[in-house]
Amino acid sequence: MKFPKDLLGIKDLSADQINEILKTAGIMKEIIVKNNKKTPHLQGKTVITLFYENSTRTRLSFELASKYLSANAANVAVASSSVAKGESLIDTARTIDMMGNDALVIRHQSAGAPHLVAANVNASVINAGDGMNEHPTQALLDAYTMIEKKGKLEGLKVAIVGDVLHSRVARSNIYLLNKFGAEVTLCAPSTLLPVEIERLNVKAYTDVEKAIKGADVVMGLRMQLERQKKGLFPSIDEYSDLFGVNEERIKLAKEDAIILHPGPVNRGVEITSGIYGHERSFIDEQVLNGVAVRMAILYLLTRKGQGEDK
Ligand code: CP
């Protein structure tokens, strides 16, 4: 199956392409869980990470994914790079491209930044999160985890609870789950629900108990304090009282419901520590699956013959 040069959003991927990524991730996961994490899939390729926003999981998992597949991997430390001297995004990306790079993994605070870069470089560009737009590789690893634990996406009731307004993770998950016939319910204070909600084919609640009731998957979202304008909710304590997922509320979900969170978690705000460590919480497994999914994406995008349709 052919893939485009770049992975910029779930919106651009077909269901078949998503299935191919998830199937390949299964093979990659087998490689990770073996003791010898090294295969020649990306031998001779170079992968650069360029993150204008902080990250632990996404950046490190792309770096490890590259190394496990035998690519040359390097990171641009934006704060100490020539970006600090005023070099533009496009000039920075083109400079990296001229060094023989094959895949550029970019996170940026502005929606659309990876799309702009993709139009100006030869390397495959992978969106690792752009503003409040999309975080496609997170949605892919979430889908992988849901299928691993629940067998399929079709018909799953997925409750996404938290700061939906600022969440690129929520948007990418909604686009992906809609493609596969899952039923998505969002829950947040009305000030933290997106204005375009009617176009998203989701249910929305401001009552967390109604949102969680009967869910197969409960996904907490981080309260994005760094993106908040003041006044969207009264206080963190009030938010966690009214919207936090805790041990009592999770009992309203199906008895075999799973708990996910993209991380990083504000313990005691969007979910309690008890929910993080719950026997049906797969938050840690999401991290492992993130490496497998990113290995699959790097392999599928950069293998010979890809990208010619773009
Ligand atoms: N989930 C996620 O994107 O985490 P990081 O910000 O640590 O990459």
Image (tube, rainbow, N blue to C red):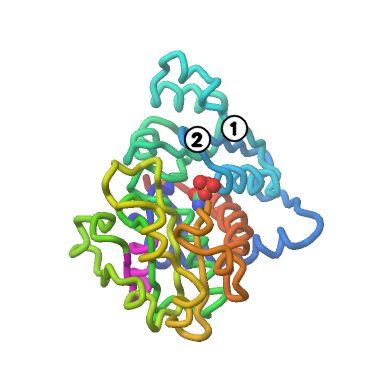
Q: How many other residues sit within 10 Å of disc 1, few (<14), some (14-19) or many (≥20)?
A: some
Does the residue at mark 1 contact the one at mark 2 (Cβ under 8 Å)? yes
In the image, 194 versus 38, the foreground residue is 194
In the image, is 275 to the left or to the right of 119? right
Give the secondary structure at mark 1. strand
Where residue 51 is drawn, which disc sits there?
2
Determine the residue positioned at 50% across, 35% down.
51
Q: Position of residue 182 (x, y in %)?
A: 37, 75
Disc nearer the start of the sequence (1/2) = 2
Which residue is at the far right? 35
In the image, 15 versus 78, the foreground residue is 78
Q: Which residues are magenta?
A: 172-187
Disc 1 to disc 2, C-alpha distance = 8 Å
| Mark 2 CB lies closer than 8 A to ligand 1 | no
In the image, is 192 to the left or to the right of 93? left
Q: Amino acid at mark 1?
A: Asn
Quarter-of-image position of residue 185: bottom left
Indicate whether residue 37 is drawn in magenta: no
Assign the C terminus to one quadrant of the image.
top left
Q: Position of residue 67 (x, y in %)?
A: 69, 44
Q: Is residue 96 above or below residue 72?
A: above
Q: Is residue 7 above or below residue 288?
A: above
Disc 1: which residue: 75
Q: How many other residues sit within 10 Å of disc 2, few (<14), some (14-19) or many (≥20)?
A: many
